Amino acid sequence: MKKTILTGDRPTGSLHIGHYLGSLKQRVALQDEYHCYIEIADVQALTDNFNNPKKVRDNVREVAKDYLAVGLDPNKVTIFVQSMIPEIAELTVYYSNLVTIARLYRNPTVKGEIEQKKHLFGEDGSSLTYGFLGYPVSQAADITAFNADLIPVGEDQLPMIEQTREIVRRFNNIYGETLTEPEALVGKVGRLKGLDGNNKMGKSLGNAIFLSDSEEIVNQKIANAITDPDKIKKDDPANPDVCMVYYYHKIFSEDNLPTICEECKKGLRGCVACKKELAKNLNDFLEPIRNKRKYYDENPEEVDKILQEGTNKAREKAIETMARVRESMQIDYDFTKRP
């Protein structure tokens, strides 16, 4: 029997090449081998965008189009919208009784994200919301609602999976064997750096190349990428190891990489020409994705149909899980029958 995978993204903006290399490429490769549930996590997105719901709503379809454009096949994977599965919310409530506040504060991933969002939650965390602190509990509900066996993650997300495993173990210990304890499927590709040299390429950091970017936008972004600050003139020798253009060449220009490196070090390659070569390679890579996305841009009703059908299918699975959960918790009331 095929194992089940659960993965997804928060709809806070279009997806970028970091998402593709870090997760989307892997999902496409796995879709023939596993039952794949792919969640557009709009509820989770609201934990730190609660004051901007339009941003989340507007990006649900954009993320879906990115999925379809990179080759995720709705006949093979189940793409669904988190908020349209009320069973996830119900599970979240039940699981919240099994996790202490102290344990949530100890989660390294949560601690790191709270630190990054001081602008939202205050320097001392005094404005931290229950929803944000507790989103690992919601994630556990996402995973277990679909009886997922494997969760593709980066190493930085391993604490989140361990939190889910703890919840599952505690639930099963109290109520009896009901839930599947998931395992992490750690990807081999690390986080992609931004064009500005930031260790993270982010939707909101202004340093990302989006899968939906036009050729002109890609050219402009690459033209502004950080290069060796010590290279002043075209024929000055440079250090490719401190150049973001070379960093991306290592990913998108593998065939010509030795030449690029040698010419850079010897001062035989100007930054303008180097950036143009990278931009061309990136645009060649993105072109088939753009073309497929254009079809869905022009046929939005097809995107809506895929989302509705995927959500219906996902909910059927979640309803099955909830029937087992309620029975185990002895809250499967039926007052039409006498005890």
Image: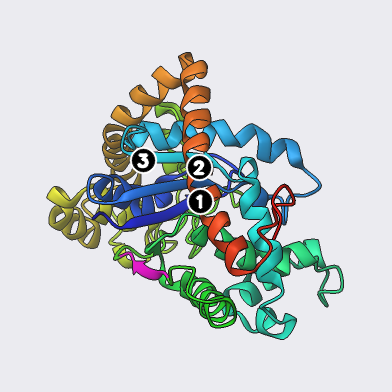
Pinpoint residue 107: horizontal percent, then vertical percent: 60, 79
Give the labeled residue for mark 1. Answer: 320
- Structural crowding at the residue carrying mark 3, measured as other residues with C-alpha within 10 Å and reported as few (<14), some (14–19) or many (≥20): many
Distance CA(mark 3)–CA(mark 1):
19 Å
Colour pattern:
rainbow
Which of the two discs, 3 and 1, labels the residue nearer the N terminus? 3
Which label lies toward us, 3 or 2?
Answer: 2
Occupied quadrant, residue 89? bottom right
Say whether disc 3 or disc 2 marks the residue closer to the N-terminus.
Answer: 3
- Residue 6 in the image: above or below residue 38: below
Quadrant of the image occupied by residue 293: top left
Identity, as a three-letter code, of the amino acid under mark 3: Val
For label 3, the residue is: 77
Q: Would residue 293 appear left or right of 207 to someone viewing this image?
A: left
Give the labeled residue for mark 2. 316
Mark-to-mark CA distance, 1 and 2: 6 Å
Which residue sits at x=30%, y=58%?
3
